[in-house]
Image (spheres, rainbow, N blue to C red):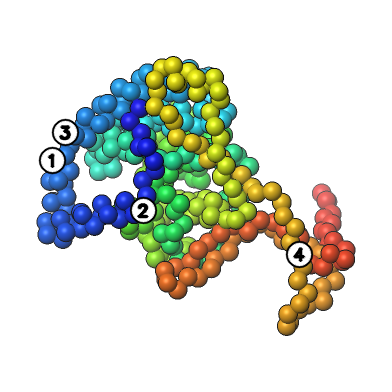
Amino acid sequence: MDRLEAAITFDQLDRMSAVMAPLVERHGSAGVAKLLESISPQLDVSMRRAAESLQSDTLFGEFRRRPPGQGLRGAHDALGEQLMYAWVLLTHPEIFGAGEGDFAPSRLRLLGLTVLNAPVFMWSGPMRKLALQSELPRHTVSRTCLQYPISWHTFESSPSSDGNVNGVQAPMLDAMLLFDAAGTGIGAVSFGASETTRDPFVWFHGTIPYGASYPLDEDGASNVLKMLAFLNSKFVITPIELLSRPTRRAMERRGDIPAPNVSVVRLRAAETYAYDETGAGSVDWAHRWMVRGHYRAQWYPSEAAHHVVWIAPYLKGPEDKPLLTHVYAVVR
């Protein structure tokens, strides 16, 4: 399977952009289009080889045989889903309504190669809900919120998207591809299926510009930035989940190229936060209370942007004080 041996880095991406910059400056977008046209035969060969290798891939085969509508059960299903979307984009782009612009068949097939080579993050329903339930503070978007230039985020259970897209009933989202859009901002593509027909669905969100001030009007910007800020929190870990031993052995017997690791989004083990009574302006609190999870933005002058991270719920106040609780009256 034609996967990259390692995830592409920002340094590699910046070097490629530096090579392209003079071409853009001299010839504009027409020059770039001409360059892409000149290498299209090589891209076509890569796409064809990738699609052919997927036909015999163990993980892809297992995923295609699973019952429809079943949630992801682990790393092998997460990788199988990624391979499934890559294969459909490479071989049947017309399923996604191939046309012009982002939906041109050549663009969709190139997107398939991108999906195939993206590191995988797997989100459980509770983790994604926790990441999205808090509001983001006002902040300036930074490139540093992306851990990788390209990443595939898959959801164990398919959440409904917010609202409709161009009048179409909200799809069930299976995954999102997040990527650095040529150093200009954060690009996002959603993958899923219609809630009513289960037809495959792909949606290109607007680019979230670096240096832009949040809140933004770009479609899906809030959820994308929340997920990235959640992953950058010290309270969140992404341990690697290995494939099962039988699956690894089956892949070895078939000669499959080893699959990339799957990072599972989890909370770090609870820590104890000491109450600091020292320092000027300390307050003589009468209670302890629970502070809910929230996002915090810290300004970095060197970047002229904020780093936004998620802060886990914690108890605040002196340990020797009573815990303040709320009592609610339930009335008709």
From the viewer's side, name the closer residue of 294 and 245: 245
Q: In the image, is residue 156 above or below residue 328?
A: above
Q: Look at mark 1 in the image and give the residue it sits on.
A: 38
Label 2 element class:
helix
Q: Tell me which numbered mark, 2 or 3, is placed earlier along the sequence.
A: 2
Relative image position of residue 79 (x, y in whole percent): 47, 31
Q: Is disc 2 surrounded by few (<14), some (14 to 19) or many (20+) residues within 10 Å?
A: some
Q: Is disc 1 surrounded by few (<14), some (14 to 19) or many (20+) residues within 10 Å?
A: few
Q: Give the residue at x 48% y 18%.
A: 250
Q: Is disc 4 surrounded by few (<14), some (14 to 19) or many (20+) residues within 10 Å?
A: few
Q: Look at mark 3 in the image and give the residue it sits on.
A: 41
Q: Tell me which numbered mark, 3 or 4, is placed earlier along the sequence.
A: 3
Residue 323: which quarter of the image?
bottom right
Q: Give the residue at x 44% y 53%.
A: 146
How far apart in space, not on screen, are marks 3 and 1 (Cα)?
A: 7 Å
Label 1 element class:
helix
From the viewer's side, name the closer residue of 47 and 218: 47
Give the label, 1 or 2, closer to the camera.
2
Q: Is residue 289 visible?
A: yes
Marks 1 and 4: CB-CB under 8 Å?
no
How far apart in space, not on screen, are marks 2 and 3 (Cα)?
A: 27 Å
Q: Give the residue at x 34% y 54%.
A: 11
Q: Look at mark 2 in the image and give the residue it sits on.
A: 10
Q: Look at mark 4 in the image and give the residue it sits on.
A: 274
Relative image position of residue 122 (x, y in whole percent): 53, 39
Q: Tell me which numbered mark, 4 or 2, is placed earlier along the sequence.
A: 2
How far apart in space, not on screen, are marks 1 and 4 (Cα)?
A: 62 Å
Q: In the image, is residue 214 above or below residue 52?
A: below
